[in-house]
Amino acid sequence: AKELMEGTLHPGDIILSVNGTDVKGWPLEDVVGAVQDTPHSESLVLEVCRAKSIDDSDDCATNIDVDCPSKQDMTVNKMRLRHTEKNASLNTDAECSNATHDENGNVETNQYQLTKDIFSLLFISNIKSQAFLYSFLCFLFQITVIILIIYDLLSDAPEGNELKIPPGASEAVITAQFLALIITVLTQDDVVTALEMADHGYHKGIMESCPSATYIKFIFANFARFGEGILTIVVSFLFIVTSTSVLDIFKDFAAVAFISNLDNLAFQLAKRGFITKSVQKDAKKVETATLSEGNTTTKSQCKLLIWNTPFHRLKIRNILFGITSVIICLPWVAIRAKQHLGYYKSLSCKSLTVKFGDETLALADGGTTLHYAYFSNNYKIEEKNKRFELEGNRPVYYERGQKEWVGKRAPGKFLYCKDLQAWAFTIEDVWPRGNSSSTWKACENWLLRSPETEVYALEEVPLQGWSIWTGITDTAQDFSLSCDECSSNIDCSLHGQCVESTCVCDKKWLGQRCDSKIPCNELLYTNNRCSDYKELPGFVLLRDENNKTMEVYGRPVFVNLDTNSLDQNFGQDFRYLYDDYLGDDYLDDGYLDDDYSVDDYFDDDYLYDDFFSNEYYFDNKVVFANDQANVVFYTGRRWYDGYFPAHNISVLRGIFKETFHAHWDSVLEDNTQWFSEQTDSSTPIGLEWYELSETRSGGDYGPFGRVKKVAASYHCKRVDCEISNVCGLYGECNKTEHTCNCKLGTFGHFCQFTSDDDYSC
């Protein structure tokens, strides 16, 4: 006979398990047999449910109300019965299971309810059923959405920053990122549920009521649940580490939470009958189904499980949960360290084209006027050993990408000022508001500042609302900045090759985007006055020692090599070079002195290139009259025509090296005679021109003082006969000589004047 050692059986009690074996739905004689089969030397453990209501129609659960433990009128008792003959505890040679043990070593078997989601529906439904198809399609949809988000987040990432990490983050954002990561791990139900089910294990007893709930499907459904949860964590991680504001972090977090909950929403739709009756029936089975902790582990495996060691209270799910937390937090720590060191500044555009308007500032030194337009240039992040200079945890942009300049020159630079909460433009040792302290500080001496912002890349700052200092705080006019890096040859206007984010332009094309075409080899100056019309040819491209066109501010430089602009020995020296190169001995001095022959020589591309490649000739023979070189060049936002002190071409080349700068070289005060209208044109052709006053009187006329408009223009010396009506109604274009042959009393380079033309200066 047996006696109750713990608890008492009452009439109406439902026996759920005998010694850990699920007996729900067994005939009475089988349950009695299981009890009788218990050896006298072992304990008998019965799990019973004392319930008031029973649903006999449920074919999946246990013929009981599974919520009975939480109701006041129900009690679940785990009764431990032992034979009176012996007080032996559980035999250690008995079959090992995933059950827990009490302090006496007796087995306690627990049941747990399936999670109400499509993965549980996937587990218990027949593989050929509508429920299985529905749950599998929902799973594929959820995974597809997540993968598309990951693809979108990682696409078009710059080299070296595949995760598109922003250059930096504020302290508030860093704190929010850390909290969001913790919340992500803690609230990721699918990962937690998958780990719990792996801990509980599979019990084949469920197949008696749900034959399709096989072990393979248990593994598949649980793996799918875990994979979806991990991918959701990955998406959350990417959203978190790429966010630059606290609001963005939690907006993205809410979006991911919705995506993660799609499986639960899909299950609720199925349970409420919005899909089909068949799917609804299987969904209701999930709601009532329970699964006992697995008993499939063998004796030999039992000794290897962690909960059968002295540390049995440390559940495997806790270990896996901890590992998941570490896996997601360690990369974030590494990313934060790299952000601090500036490794992710590659996300910022490293090269910007900045353009200023015509604003000026009379500096406190009393004699210098700062023309902001002269600092319209290319600005780059200076990189050394893959490190970037940072201010306010943001990159610093230097004019031409050089922090150190020769002599007392200093580049313009853009940096972020935390005190201003804005980006600022400054020039070292330039005191726009006077010297108020012994130490020059960049942010205190700003010349231009953005509206308040926290963005980490300069190109992302809105162009509206910038303030400029002109003696007062004013709104910047005509200010712009844009990224000039390339990602393909299309960004180089198809006139160059994109090499390491920089355009390498084809011949006759210049500029950061190869969008400035060299119009022609030689320019012709005309004064456009019919009364004393004259043409001045000979403005040719200035080339360096390697026969490459020299440029400043992304535009070509033209130097006047007309006979009148050079030393008197020019003709003789040119004759020597011409005969030596081409062997045209029949040419006499008179012919070589003819300007047209010289110009025609320049106009031939092949001869022109060959001519300029002769270092001996240029370095020694081209000597400028009065040691003054007449040059047409671009600086700031205008084209200029002026004179530079240069004995020969070598000296002139030195002036227009990379160190040339309109402000520091005082080109307006010392070298300029004429200037064009404001323009971004790559050529001086077709512009209106102005002449500076001989007295250089500033008055209150504006940034250039008193000026007068002049009737002058520049054109290509060679007339392009392909242009329709290029020589007008009374001229004919000579395609051999590339000139206009004027008729009926017309004259001018394009036959643009008549004898009675009233155009005058």
Image: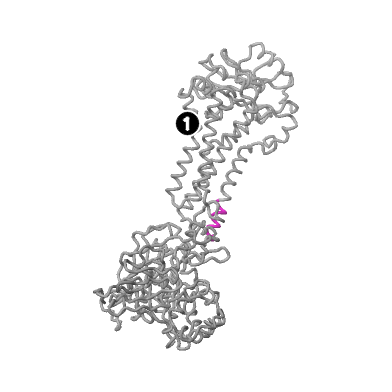
- Looking at the rendered structure, the number of numbered marks drawn on it comes to 1
Which secondary structure type mostly characterizes the magenta part of the structure?
helix
Position of residue 720 relative to residue 202, above or below, is below
Where does the image place residue 105, in percent across and percent down from the top left?
69, 29
**Residue closest to the eye, 310 or 257:** 257
Q: On the image, numbered disc 1 is attached to which residue?
A: 265
Position of residue 701 relative to residue 211, above or below, is below
User: Which residues lie in the magenta part?
Assistant: 332-342
Residue type highlighted by circle 1: Leu
**Residue closest to the eye, 86 or 438:** 438
Decide if residue 622 is in sight here. Answer: yes
Decide whether residue 231 is among the magenta residues: no
Where does the image place residue 284, in percent across and percent down from the top left?
51, 22
**Left or right position of 269 against 480:** right
**Residue closest to the eye, 406 or 63:** 406
Q: In which quarter of the image is the C terminus?
A: bottom left
Residue pictured at 55% horizontal, 44% vertical: 234
Q: Quadrant of the N terminus?
A: top right
Position of residue 75 relative to residue 428, above or below, is above
**Residue closest to the eye, 724 or 691:** 724
Q: Which residue lies furthest to the front in this view?
A: 744
**Element type at marker 1?**
helix
Decide if residue 363 is in sight here. Answer: no
Where does the image place residue 238, in percent across and percent down from the top left?
52, 47
Where does the image place residue 533, in percent across and percent down from the top left?
31, 78
For label 1, the crowd category at 10 Å Cα-Cα, with few meaning under 14, some 14 to 19 and many 20 or more, is: some
Residue pictured at 52% horizontal, 74% vertical: 607
